Image (cartoon, coloured by chain):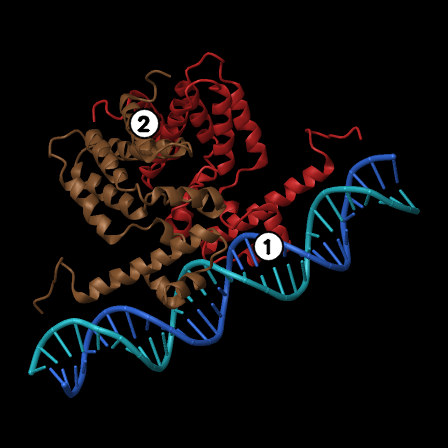
Chain colours: A brown, B red, C blue, D cyan
Amino acid sequence: MIVAKGDGMSLREQKKLAVWRAIRAAALGLFDERGYESVSVEQIAAAAKVSRATFFNYFASKEAVVFDQDPEERDHWRRLMDARPAGEPLWDSLTAIMIGFNERLADRMPLQRRLKAQSPALAQSTQDLGEQFRTDLRDWVAERTDGADPLTATLQFNLAFAAVSTAYQTWPSDESFDQYLQRLRRCLDQAGAGAGAKG
Amino acid sequence: MIVAKGDGMSLREQKKLAVWRAIRAAALGLFDERGYESVSVEQIAAAAKVSRATFFNYFASKEAVVFDQDPEERDHWRRLMDARPAGEPLWDSLTAIMIGFNERLADRMPLQRRLKAQSPALAQSTQDLGEQFRTDLRDWVAERTDGADPLTATLQFNLAFAAVSTAYQTWPSDESFDQYLQRLRRCLDQAGAGAGAKG
DNA sequence: CTCCAAAACTAGACGGCGTCTAATTATAGA
DNA sequence: TCTATAATTAGACGCCGTCTAGTTTTGGAG
């Protein structure tokens, strides 16, 4: 019962993670070559050498396999949140966290964009950045602003996501990921300065 | 071929609208008493004295019957958009349109809230205010800001919706609709002033 | 190494959504 | 009254997501 190898994971947990990644890799591979709509969960499961039931043990839906984040990513963004100094204005914290989070998406964004462009089903999904991140950030904001005005906190939270959406939506297909990040910074700045400012 | 009665609608169009409303009324009635999840499209169709296939002629999905707007509402919000004076700053226009649009939702919001609270499926739907409105407003913004900086326009558009979401999310169940509208105005004002302002 | 309880996996069936086709019925208007 | 066109329909289909009950794997204690 001493536990815990290399990282803080038991052998079982390591195997689970491996299966998770195998399923996701299989799914993204198939989606990439044949498109989201025309790949069934059965086919994904088969490609990952796993049963259909197991697929749904790991992912709540077919969409989730596109949007869910690697469990290890979660550690990263939690560190980002913990790293914000205590007295920092909420908006500055949100800006920094959003940028830090997005910087990590370089690998997966291109495929995700391609799939969303193809598939109506994915196109209008709230998910985008992973509901997990959204939830964690929401909790972090709630804790950080405990006692203070919840409306202002919620508003800033939503504005930050609106800024990210804007950067994402206006990202032309011929621009690099770095340019996307630049754009994101601009959006966050402008949102911070106020929608009414300029015009 | 002279056409057009009372309003600008042919007889056929009037009948279609009547069926549309019958289906929606039947659906909302059933949802209200038994909950969203436990009512099937078959049952809705039966209650509206219509076949399942016809249901899908009128609504693209089961969710749509909750979120789609009455076709006549569309006239209203288009008038709202057309009413904005030409030189007005975009943010002021968006604020006015959002408020005007929301003022009309007094009847449907309570049920919609109740359903969203019950149903996980509805809870995280992008729809909320009707995709139709979003699309129309997007087009209006695009036309209004033609030639100008599209990033700023998109950003303001998204910020306006974030403000509405915030008002909606922070609306306590014991508050009146009027209080919701007040809250909405505050959110729009704060978003206009900037997320970074105060805090 | 042996063994066992816990965890992971699996097959299979089910209800419901959304799509499609081909056929039937209703209706506006000449 | 007649007809072209639009609306409605039954029925079948594939797939998603859920569930149950049973089987296999596996890590670690003794």
Asked if residue A188 lies left or right of residue B178, the reply is left
From the image, tell me which residue sits under label 1: B45
Disc number placed over residue B7 in the picture, else none: none
Q: Which of B136/A175 is in front? A: A175
Residue visible at 73% across and 30% down in the picture: B5
Is A84 in front, or is B196? A84
Q: Position of residue A78 (x, y in %)?
A: 18, 45
Output the chain of dot 1: B
Give the image location of residue A104, x and y in percent: 26, 42
Decide if residue A124 is in sight here: no
Judged from the image, the secondary structure of the residue bearing numbered disc 1 is helix
Looking at the rendered structure, the kind of residue marked 2 is Cys
Residue pictured at 40% horizontal, 18% vertical: B92
Left or right of A187? Residue B32 is: right
Q: Secondary structure beneath disc 2?
A: helix
* Residue assigned mark 2: A187
Which quarter of the figure is the N terminus of chain A placed in? Answer: bottom left
* Viewer-nearest of discs 1 and 2: 2
Q: In this view, does B55 lie to the left or right of B176?
A: right
| Label 2 Cα neighbours within 10 Å, binned few <14 / some 14-19 / many ≥20 | many
Q: In this view, does D30 lie above or below B41?
A: below
